[in-house]
Every structure is written in structure tokens, then in C-alpha cells.
Amino acid sequence: QNPDEMEALLQEGVCDMFALVRAYYTDPEYLRKIREGRPEDIRPCTWCNRCHGNLKAPWLNLCTVNPFMGQESKLPRLVEQTKGGKKVAVIGGGPAGLESALDCAQRGHHVTLFEQENYLGGQLRHTDDYAFKWGLKKFRDWLIAQCEKHGVEFRMNTKAEPEMIRFEGFDAVIACTGSRANLPDSIAGI
């Protein structure tokens, strides 16, 4: 699904054409972005096979990295489009926080993302340690790059306190603080 690799294979005469499915599930604007010379904006596929849908009812096709896939007919009724220009705070720099910040920035809002750690990506930081997680690493890096491209302000090592949020006068706050393991207290040595 790498546009540069596909172009090289075409030029070398190795093949005549490509058939892409996952690429369009992940990013319906795939070809347009290639034609416009913006391959870095293509949402990367993680090759998780979730797009092949459920094997039993309700037979929905979903995409792990494209939250809009399968929801196209519902979203306009569920989420009202805003005109942009609002000041939005996103709390948490994991995948959900990055995706929320990107969506808001693409809608024309001024977004500040607060992350209490010194890194972005949340649990996806572990993809740096395992080569076989390259797809998730590429997706994490893409999210960060797209947020930067769309002007999201990152405040690292900053715990978003209610007083700070109120003082700065944000119009909206999106909490994407992740989860914590629910471990039982009754197991010795845990």
C-alpha cells in the first residue's frame, strides 16, 4: 500500500496495476491524496483484518484506524457539524486523544492537547520495542504528524487540572485519559 513502492514496481515493469481494498477502507481519499502529491497524508493500514467484518450478525465492516468506516450514513445525524473556531482542550495523548485532536483541528478548531507524560501515543509507545508492531507504530507516528500539520498545540508533561482548563477559557473539553488496570487487592505480591 506504499505509493512510492507501487510506482517503482510499475516503472520497473514488475506489474501493470494494483488492486487495493484495505487502503480504501482505511482512507477513502487514498487515490486523491496520491494525485495531489500528498502520500504522507494517507491514513496507514495496520493490516489487522478487522475490515473483513463479523462472521455473524450484524455483519458490520469496521476499521481499526478509520473510526468513520461503516458509520458514514449515521454520522451526519449523530454528530452535528460545527463551523470551527472554538477553543478545544483534549486531555490525553494516546490514540483516542490524538484522533480527537486531529478531527477537531480538521474541522477548524484551535486544539490544545494535554499529555502528562513526555511522549505521545499512550500504550502505542510499546510499538517502538517490537518490530512486528510496525503497522501500529506507523499509525501512531502518522497521527502525531497529522496533528502537528493541522496545528494542534501539544503540552507535554502537563497534567490538565480543572482550574487550568477553566482559566484558559476552553469552549469544549474532550477527555481521552485511557484506562487503568483493575487489579484485585486480595492477591499477595501483586
Image (cartoon, grey):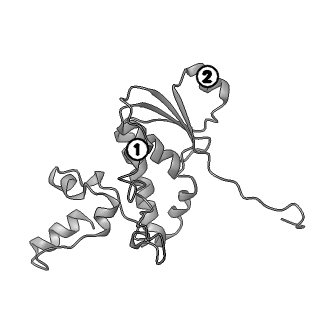
Quarter of the picture containing the C terminus is bottom right
Report the amino acid beneath label 1: Arg
Badge 2 element? helix
Please provide percent x and percent y for residue 16.
10, 76
Residue in the picture at 39% in, 40% down:
148
Rendered view: 36 above or below 170: below
Can you tell which quarter of the image residue 166 is in?
Answer: top right
Report the amino acid beneath label 2: Arg
Please provide percent x and percent y for residue 87.
47, 26
Badge 1 element? helix
Give the numbered dot on residue 150. none
User: Which one is earlier in the sequence, the residue at label 1 or at label 2?
Assistant: 1
Please provide percent x and percent y for residue 178.
62, 50
The one of 79 and 161 positioned closer to us in this rendering: 79
Residue in the picture at 21% in, 52% down:
33
Please provide percent x and percent y for residue 161.
66, 30
Q: Which residue is mark 1?
A: 77
Q: Which residue is mark 2?
A: 166
Residue in the picture at 56% in, 62% down:
126
Quarter of the picture containing the N terminus is bottom left
Residue in the picture at 60% in, 19% down:
167
The one of 49 and 55 positioned closer to us in this rendering: 55
Rendered view: 54 above or below 176: below
- What is the distance, in whole Å, between disc 1 and disc 2 at their CAs? 30 Å
Left or right: where does residue 53 sit relative to residue 188? left
